[in-house]
Image (cartoon, rainbow, N blue to C red):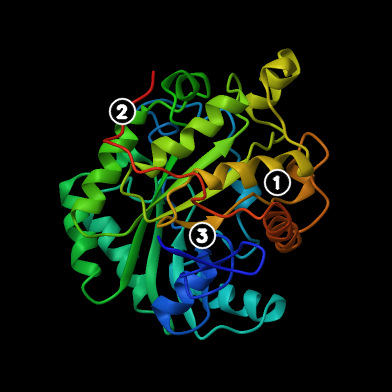
Amino acid sequence: MNLEYQGMGAAIYRWGTKRRFNAYSDHMKKKAGGRVQKLTIDAGFSCPNRDGTKGTGGCSFCLNDAFSPSYCMPEKSIAKQISEGIEFHARRYRRAEKYLAYFQAFSNTHAPVDTLAAKYREALDCEGVIGLVIGTRPDCMNAEKLSLLRELSHHHYIIVEYGIESVYNRTLERVNRLHTFEDSLEAVKMTAGCGIPVGGHLIFGLPGENRQDMMESARIISQMPLDQVKFHQLQIFRGTAMEQEYRNNPDDFRLFTEDEYLDFMAEYIEMLDPRIVIERIAGETPPRYSLLRPWGPRYDQILVRFEKLLEKKDTWQGKRWQPAGSVKPVS
């Protein structure tokens, strides 16, 4: 990605804005021609790590309730959740006219294709919904499901978001993820190969990973055919297996303060391929779920602080990024 410079080296980016990273909000405005709002849905799917397909304990860090809005309940129809979601966002934020139905809860491709098709089409039939965001695990995808998504993508915006979480198999095993980084790499390649936009989710601060480990992941994911990414700091939730692990072995965790995390992210995105859209740099959940004291500001305030830090450091996404060869799995 080319850069132009003006004045004291301030970077002016060709993402259509003067922001110092490839921001999701700007990306979607250009793609959809205006503001687009995600509407979170719980469509009643389970997870192979919960229903016995692979395991029953779930990932050690997982607490789905911490990320679900109050209107989001599987007992309600998808259409009703979308209707209530539009009302919810109209009260809290400025009104959008276009929406993406976000299948977020658990693994949203973990079902037969006919079931998936019915649920996806119910969402797409709702007024104002222009597409789907489908959150899932990399071991819950196959050619038949991708064929359905490719068909839907002919007339709608479809993106699949995979929970990669870590590029290290030792970490994935420790958090009881029950899939490998090789699974993530294969799913991302398969999806991109079908012409379907693909996103990934990573967590920073998982037990056993140090700062160098986390920084190295920027090089690795930059070599994957990802269109966008979400980054979250590790949050330890009450009632999870990770709560007990933290109580037993607190020194194994790299939990960031807000200032530490923003410094880390400013350095991290320097090594990230500038073509990749950054959807989030941090997570935000209701304080009642957190074992430890959560950060005070809301996400939008954290984002403002982050952009000011990038300006102060005169840095930007991709500043130190170097094209490389094919990605190699990490043990």
- Mark 3 vs mark 2: give the one in front: 2
Numbered badge on residue 262: 1
Q: As shown in the figure, which amino acid type bears the numbered disc 2?
A: Lys
Marked residue nearer the N-terminal end (3 or 1): 3
Callout 2 environment at 10 Å: few (<14), some (14 to 19), or many (20+)?
A: few
Q: Secondary structure at mark 1?
A: helix
Residue of label 3: 75
Say above or below: 254 vs 323.
above
Secondary structure at numbered mark 2 = loop
As drawn, which residue projects farthest toward the top? 248
Residue pictured at 75% horizontal, 38% vertical: 260
On-image quarter of the C terminus: top left
Image location (x, y in percent) of residue 148 = 20, 60
- Report if residue 53 is visible in the image: no
Residue 20 in the image: x percent, y percent?
58, 61
How packed mark 1 is, by other alpha carbons closer than 10 Å (few <14, some 14-19, many 20 or more), is many
- In the image, residue 67 sits, relative to residue 31, either above or below, namely above
